[in-house]
Amino acid sequence: MKLGLIGYPLGHSWSKPIHDFMIGSDYQMFELKPEELADFMTKKDFDGLNVTIPYKQKVMQYLDEIDETAAKIGAVNTIVNHDGILKGYNTDYLGFMEMLKRNQIDVRNKKTAVLGSGGASRAVAAALTILGADFDIVSRKAEREDTILYETMYERSDDYQVIINTTPVGLAPHPDEMPVDLDRFGRLEAVADIIANPLRSRLLFEAGCRHLKTAGGLEMLVAQAWYADLLYTGKQLDPQLITACLEELYRDRRSIVLIGMPTAGKTTVSALLGEVCGRDVIEMDDEIVEILGTSIKECFAEKGEDYFRWLEQEVAKDLRSGGRFVISCGGGVIKNPETMRFLSENSIVVWLKRGIEQLFATDSRPLSSNADALRKLYEERKPLYELYSDVSADNTGDIGDTVAEILRKTGERKKRI
């Protein structure tokens, strides 16, 4: 079966590994320039296609049939070649509903702002209609009667309980951008972002810092691919493939970041975790010491904590792309939100917990050189460890038990021998 993805550009697409995992297909990437689209579609040299930006609406003119829901949405993201008859479907809205379900975000009767008015926005609007949400589509330009401007949205900001980003703002290679100012919304409960790269967009990070429910685009992407593969194969695939595929992608693309108090055992645990999982271990403090050419204690004494935190942030920025690493952080890494944003972007953050009675002061740690300083530090930092961590792991007993708990909570596996 010859399948593939068309769009432009396709540099950051996840589609091939997803469909290869789901159905083991001969999946190809067709990066088509606008002038190449007509010839490609006319030749029909494929069994099925996924469609992404900027062609979800443009491909419709080349189709022989369009599914009723896709026609209402006005965008196609899946095409099946039935013996030369091209039929278009939309599975984005199904993937979006699955994403909300997995993250327990209920939009029924909730005032919702949908950022963006393109093809993805139309699919999200279809899903929200089915789910019973009261929503506005928000656009930079009032191009359609059913859209409002961002200025209007902000005027009504206290009405909104859910925000959904369907724009590419915040997508790599520009992950520092924000599509909306969350501080202007007083009643928000949840934020969803269909961006899948990075895994945790800046919008989602900021929402998490405000204790809001969040949902990221990789879940939508995998779920819509599962629905597309149903159409390609004509078979009933196991829904558990969605979860299994997500876990596989996370294992391959997401680092494991350990945070916690000084002397909580991060260095020891990360070394064993890396060995068990077959991941390279990065000690952030060691990276900083190598740059400094001196000890952290001397850095604090000569240049101050602010300089050290800035350098820590720069190291975190270099690690933001994720990968198969175990990253062990210094105890104070949580003091800088930007540092944590970089580390969280393509990672799962684990708080390594050890009670104050098992921590100990050490002269090598400039901020915890005695028992009183250590206790004060613990009380100050505990809420930040809670805020920035995705999961926690107890490190008060056997280290093997601690690593096993991290494996279970992160979905990681032991390496194959």
Image (cartoon, rainbow, N blue to C red):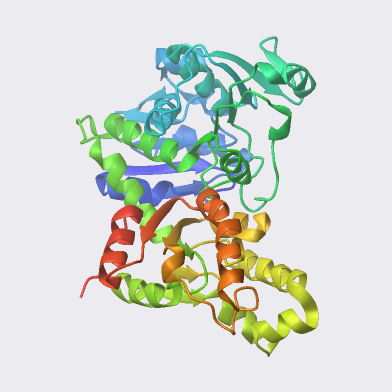
Q: Position of residue 26 (x, y in %)?
A: 31, 50
Where is residue 317, by image quadrant?
Answer: bottom right
Q: Foreground: 16 or 194?
A: 194
- Residue 38 position (above or below residue 376): above
Where is residue 278, by image quadrant?
Answer: bottom left
Q: Is residue 25 visible?
A: no
Quadrant containing the C terminus is bottom left
Please tell me how many numbered marks the rendered image carries.
0
Q: Is residue 17 visible?
A: yes
Q: Position of residue 214 (x, y in %)?
A: 51, 36
Residue at 79 percent across and 79 percent down: it is 303
Q: Foreground: 298 or 191?
A: 298
Q: Position of residue 22 (x, y in %)?
A: 28, 44
Residue at 61 percent across and 51 percent down: it is 172
- Residue 3 position (above or below residue 191): below
- Residue 307 position (above or below residue 317): below
Quadrant containing the N terminus is top left
Q: Foreground: 148 or 182?
A: 182
Q: Is residue 223 left or right of residue 241?
A: right
Farthest-out residue, front? 372
Q: Foreground: 133 or 171?
A: 133
- Residue 299 position (above or below residue 236): below
Q: Position of residue 186 (x, y in %)?
A: 68, 25
Q: Is residue 410 left or right of residue 367?
A: left
